[in-house]
Image: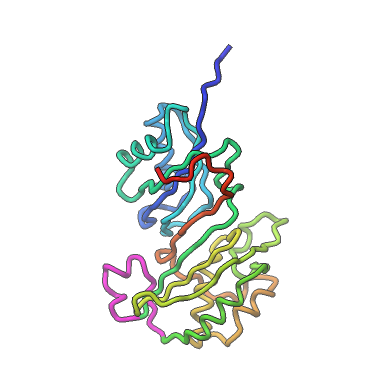
Amino acid sequence: MFRVMPERTLQLVLHYDGACFAGWQRQPETRTVQGVLEETLARLCATPTPVIGAGRTDAGVHARGQAAGVRVAARWSAPSLRRALNATLPDDVWVAAAHEMRPEFHARYSATARGYRYVVGTDEEARSPFRRRWEWTFARAVDEERLGGAAAALVGEHRFLAFAVRGTAPADDDHRCVVREARWRRDGGGRLVFEVVANRFLHHMVRFLVGTMLDEASGRRETGTVRRLLDAADNREVSPPAPAHALFLERVEYPADLYLDTDSA
């Protein structure tokens, strides 16, 4: 009879620069965040170790709070696995924290909210190579009152069919999301930052929202476009999505009772 080895369920909180990744999800012969993590864990644990992410970031999208779940042998504590990973992973991935979780924890299905940030450079210095890598340089004048009004319209439960890629959700998905927070703020004078927190996000949803809000606020779309599209039956009228390189997954939230420890490793 084979003896079942004791395991730990851990949550890894990840930072990564998405510029050199083809997104989160493992793909054959393509560099992805999930693929790099699983390769590294296989070497450390001497066995295949699946990694489940809280969500799939697209190619070029960054993270400062992606959550990933792993099950490892009990000899690995959260602090020891974090140290081993950070000594082995490539420079564009870093484990910011690790937590021991209850066995029922699931990185995707246990999440109650996710938060994203999108950065837009509106001043001349936004063209600097030290900013343009992580900001969308936006040359048109922006009416910040209209921008704020468009963001405010997103708060609450809505059907975001107009702000998602067609055919990427299951046929029975109603595309409903509950947005808890949505706002634009100035950061350092030359940057506009969009911050949004919701229970879920659809494929390209944040980027479609940013592109449409900025078109509305810069006069390319009429006032109220975003609010009107929340009632649309398809995505034919949405603006092109904002570029991926200025989008960051900031955090993923879970119920407190799933944590066996509450301190960062």
- Region in magenta: 123-140
Q: Which residue shows up at 44% across the image and 48% down it?
A: 13
Q: Is residue 202 visible?
A: no
Rendered image quadrant of residue 119: bottom left
Q: Is residue 127 magenta?
A: yes
Q: Is residue 42 visible?
A: yes
Q: Nearer the viewer, residue 135 or 153?
A: 153
Where's the N terminus, which quadrant? top right
Q: Which residue shows up at 37% across the image and 35% down it?
A: 80
- Direction right: furthest residue: 172
Q: How is the image coloured?
A: rainbow
Relative image position of residue 135 (x, y in whole percent): 37, 70
Relative image position of residue 20 (x, y in whole percent): 35, 54
Side of 131 relative to 228 (left or right): left
Q: Which residue shows up at 58% across the image and 41% down it?
A: 105
Q: Is residue 115 above or below residue 85?
A: below
Where's the C terminus, which quadrant? top left
